[in-house]
Image (cartoon, rainbow, N blue to C red):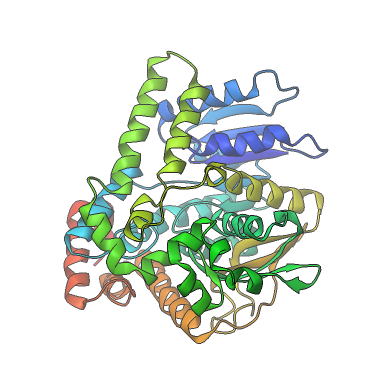
């Protein structure tokens, strides 16, 4: 089986390859093609993968290319993990928004809108090329904002594009551990949009175990979301939110912490990855060791500002383990390629799963996966407070797609102005003008 990764010079590619190396079952991936526009980054990641494969029998072969059609032409699966404007763009998105006193995070708030306006046109072109060159390939989208980008690509690829994120599986794993149960034994009732979902039940043998956790403040303090949101708020919700909802529920604190920080998350990652790729370009030492050290630093500082804002403390050592990103990807490929029926939380077209959205809206819900792809499972209706956020943010996503596909500056302004985390139409107007000034790619907006 052939797998292609678009954005193959990206930092998280070794996580996927590690999962491929561990898969020794029949029908596994035997050929991996990495595509990127930056040959130096491709070579750096190729070196990491070569060290990972050292001593592993029948490791998947690795090829690299900068030609898109060549990369996807014979692929059975295509992972799309691109970052338009790189981390330089993310850092700028964050800083420009914070200068206006609003959140600039890459998927949440004004920064997410700016990033989406730059990413959707590129993702749209990629989807058209895959549809033309490899119409039978399955496309798995990692590119943020994942739900928005998946929905845009689905206009060309239909149900053959599926978005994935490791946040829900990480949340489920942490909650299961807090309950003292093995994550594989838990059935998760999770629903919402990408980076905007709620875990409403954790069923073991048909019995929901989440209420016993919510009733125990001491146990709620043992895992990351419990410390991040606080026992009182989780008990008031009757659910455990995705970590990204901290930006909504504690927006004032999150913005204040981000503005007070010495650097934004994007700036930190930009500097860290510059060091990492420069180290590998020098050709000295172990590429794998350098990558793993950078990965650990990246994980340990994840959402550090949010934790500091509410006094949540450092991350637990168990939260530093990777496993969500690649495990979801490998499980999804196996389920489709081998018809190994599985239930996974994915970003797919709604098809009635959430009654507050239309069938074509991409949502993040449990899905039944097999050789025919992923089909959303019908879930209980969202409570009013969650439904309100979901419909508001979906309207933002739709406005971004409209702007990116028609060139409408009015739609781009609407996307910024109606976002729940942008508190003024005047601020939205200034942000749009500022983003257009700093990002030439937005010249298409008229």
Q: Quadrant of the C terminus?
A: bottom left
Q: Nearer the viewer, residue 222 or 192?
A: 222
Q: Which residue appears at 64% of the width and 48% of the height? A: 329
Closest to the observer, 332 or 387: 387
Q: Position of residue 323 (x, y in %)?
A: 61, 44
Asked where in the image residue 177 lies, by quadrant, the reply is bottom right
The residue closer to the viewer here, 94 or 207, is: 207
Outermost residue, bottom direction? 384
| Residue ID at (65%, 81%) | 380
Q: Position of residue 321 (x, y in %)?
A: 57, 42
Q: Quadrant of the N terminus?
A: top right
Q: Is residue 227 left or right of residue 331?
A: left
Q: Is residue 390 above or below residue 28?
A: below
Horizontal and vertical percent for residue 190?
61, 69
**Residue sitting at x 34%, y 75%:** 420
> Is residue 36 visible in the rendered structure shown here?
no
The residue under the point 56% across, 73% down is 239
Quarter of the image where one finds residue 298: top left
Q: Is residue 224 visible?
A: yes
Is residue 373 rendered to the left or right of residue 95?
right
Instruction: Please give left or right for residue 133 compared with residue 149 in the image.
Output: right
Q: Position of residue 193 (x, y in %)?
A: 51, 69
Q: Residue furthest front?
A: 218
């Amino acid at each position: 089986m052939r797998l292609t990764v678009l954005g193959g010079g990206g930092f998280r590619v070794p996580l996927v390859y590690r999962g491929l190396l561990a898969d020794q079952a029949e029908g596994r991936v035997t050929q991996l093609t990495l595509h990127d526009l930056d040959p130096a980054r491709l070579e750096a990641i190729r070196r990491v993968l070569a060290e990972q494969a050292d001593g592993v029998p029948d490791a998947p072969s690795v090829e690299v290319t900068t030609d898109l059609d060549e990369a996807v032409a014979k692929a059975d699966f295509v992972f799309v993990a691109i970052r338009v404007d790189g981390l330089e763009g993310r850092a700028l998105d964050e800083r420009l928004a914070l200068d206006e006193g609003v959140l600039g995070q890459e998927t949440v708030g004004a920064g997410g809108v700016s990033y989406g306006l730059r990413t959707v046109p590129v993702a749209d072109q990629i989807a058209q090329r895959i549809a033309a060159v490899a119409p039978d390939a399955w496309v798995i989208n990692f590119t943020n904002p994942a739900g928005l980008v998946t929905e845009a690509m689905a206009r060309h690829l239909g149900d053959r594009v599926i978005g994935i994120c490791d946040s829900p599986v990480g949340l489920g794993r942490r909650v299961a551990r807090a309950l003292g149960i093995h994550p594989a034994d838990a059935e998760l009732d999770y629903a919402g949009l990408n980076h905007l979902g709620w875990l409403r039940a954790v069923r073991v043998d048909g019995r929901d175990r989440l209420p016993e956790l919510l009733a125990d403040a001491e146990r709620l303090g043992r895992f990351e979301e419990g410390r991040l949101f606080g026992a009182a708020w989780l008990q008031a919700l009757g659910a455990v939110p995705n970590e990204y909802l901290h930006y909504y529920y504690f927006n004032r604190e999150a913005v204040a912490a981000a503005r007070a920080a010495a650097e934004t998350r994007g700036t930190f990652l930009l500097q860290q990855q510059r060091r990492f790729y420069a180290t590998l370009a020098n050709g000295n030492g172990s590429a794998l060791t350098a990558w793993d050290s950078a990965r650990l630093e990246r994980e340990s500082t994840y959402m550090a500002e949010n934790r500091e804002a509410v006094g949540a403390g450092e991350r637990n050592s168990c939260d530093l383990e990777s496993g969500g990103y690649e495990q979801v990807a490998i499980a999804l490929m196996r389920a489709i390629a081998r018809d190994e029926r599985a239930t996974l939380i994915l970003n797919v077209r709604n098809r009635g799963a959430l009654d507050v959205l239309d069938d074509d809206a991409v949502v993040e819900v449990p899905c039944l996966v097999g050789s025919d792809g992923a089909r959303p499972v019908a879930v209980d209706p969202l409570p009013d407070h969650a439904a309100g956020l979901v419909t508001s943010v979906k309207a933002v996503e739709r406005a971004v797609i409209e702007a990116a596909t028609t060139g409408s500056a009015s739609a781009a302004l609407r996307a910024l102005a109606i976002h729940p985390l942008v508190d003024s139409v005047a601020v939205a107007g200034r942000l749009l003008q500022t983003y257009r000034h700093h990002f030439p790619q937005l010249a298409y907006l008229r």
